[in-house]
Amino acid sequence: MVYCHPMTDRRLPRRRPQRIALLAFPGIRAFDVAVITEVWGTDRRDRGVPPFTLLRAAADPAVPVPLRGGLSLSPDTPLDRLDDLTPADLVVIPGIEDPDADLPEPVLDALRRAHARGVPVAALCAGAFVLARAGLLAGRRAVTHWHLAGTLAERHPETRVEPEALFIEDTGIWTSAGTAAGIDLCLHLVRTTHGAETAATIARSMVTAPFRTGTQAQFIEHPTPRADRDADALADVRAHALAHLDAPHTVASLAARAGMSPRSFARHFRATTGTTPLRWLVAQRVAAARKLLERTDHPLPEVARRAGFGSEVTLRQHFAAHLSTSPRDYRAAFRHPTGTTASTASTASAGSATGGSSPIAR
């Protein structure tokens, strides 16, 4: 199983919005450009989302960048301005249509310089090939679309290609699997710098799942059904677990609720979700704890109890393992300015997994 290590804490001074640089050059995928623009280029301040500054950086910003399907992107920032006048806090590379295409040397140089300055760099889908050509994946773990994983490994044997994960981080370099996994990575990067509440608000406006872990499998093989009945049973089990995260769930107890043997339950659960029951449960508990820390003033032992960790010690251990921070430091960084009541907080765990039922709004 591939583990996704959280990005080093890069909380920004509140004096300016976070700057995200989208590197634009011929051959990038329109879908990924749209995802990056939707996540960081849409004004959602009316919903409490802080503003971002999205820079569309290209070697020559006076020339539109052609995209597949007759579309084009109008850049607004020269690549060399990312070094000094308009430094980026995050650089994102869309996927490319052709992994064999020639890549502009100014783009590769900009990536190398950004990484040398300690700026996190993320590549969606086949954008991993761009990172590899820039020499940034040598000795690092990376992921790309499952169909291209073998090609990446063959052409760049110095890269440790992980074919299954949705997204991966290795020492400041992020890569994602194909298409929808790019959305997961972008939302995760928002969650890392601005908290789970902000990421969930953006996800709701995009009508997408707010939280899929990087370890979830990108290519899920479904067994021959008993299907509708099994799927309904598993959906009921997940809903029950989310509504009772503070209960002492085990694979055996969850399997009993689904009317399956533990072995059969574990197999069907993984086929449906791409992960194991206990890893899924821990991920949901971490997500619930994050919301409670952001939205309530509950003391840490109470947060641990409500999220299902039982003790503050266990809560701290999981935050260290999953987020590379402590619950206390997380609250200090991401505490929502307006606070909520205890009754609102009690629904935090369910909201973390369902995305809530708020009206769609940009």
Image (tube, helix red, strand yellow):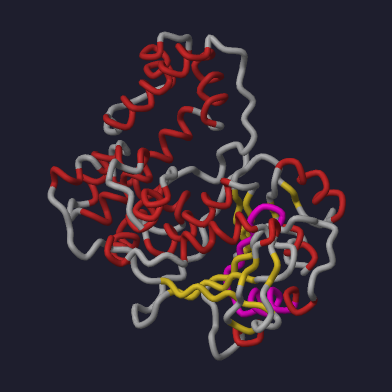
Of residues 307 and 206, the one drawn nearer to the viewer in this rendering? 206
**Is residue 178 toward the left or the right of residue 281 in the image?**
right
- Which percent across, then down, holds residue 246? 27, 33
Where does the N terminus fall, quadrant-wise?
A: top right
Look at the picture and state if 70 lies above or below 301. below
- Which percent across, then down, holds residue 45? 31, 67
Q: Is residue 123 magenta?
A: yes
- For residue 255, which quarter of the picture? top left
Residue at x-position 66% and y-position 86%: 80
- Which percent across, then down, holds residue 142? 69, 53
Q: Is residue 127 visible?
A: no
- For residue 356, which quarter of the picture? top left
The stretch in magenta equals 109-127
Residue at x-position 58% and y-position 74%: 56
Q: Is residue 217 visible?
A: yes
**Is residue 114 toward the left or the right of residue 149 in the image?**
left
Look at the picture and state if 19 lies above or below 92. below
Q: Residue furthest bottom?
A: 85
Residue at x-position 37% and y-position 59%: 195
Of residues 14 and 106, the one drawn nearer to the viewer in this rendering? 106
Q: Is residue 342 magenta?
A: no
Look at the picture and state if 253 lies above or below 55. above
Where does the C terminus fall, quadrant-wise?
A: bottom left
Of residues 208 and 330, the one drawn nearer to the viewer in this rendering? 208
- Which percent across, then down, holds residue 237? 37, 21
Look at the picture and state if 150 lies above or below 340. above
Residue at x-position 23% and y-position 54%: 295
- For residue 270, which quarter of the picture? top right
Q: Number of callouts in the render?
A: 0
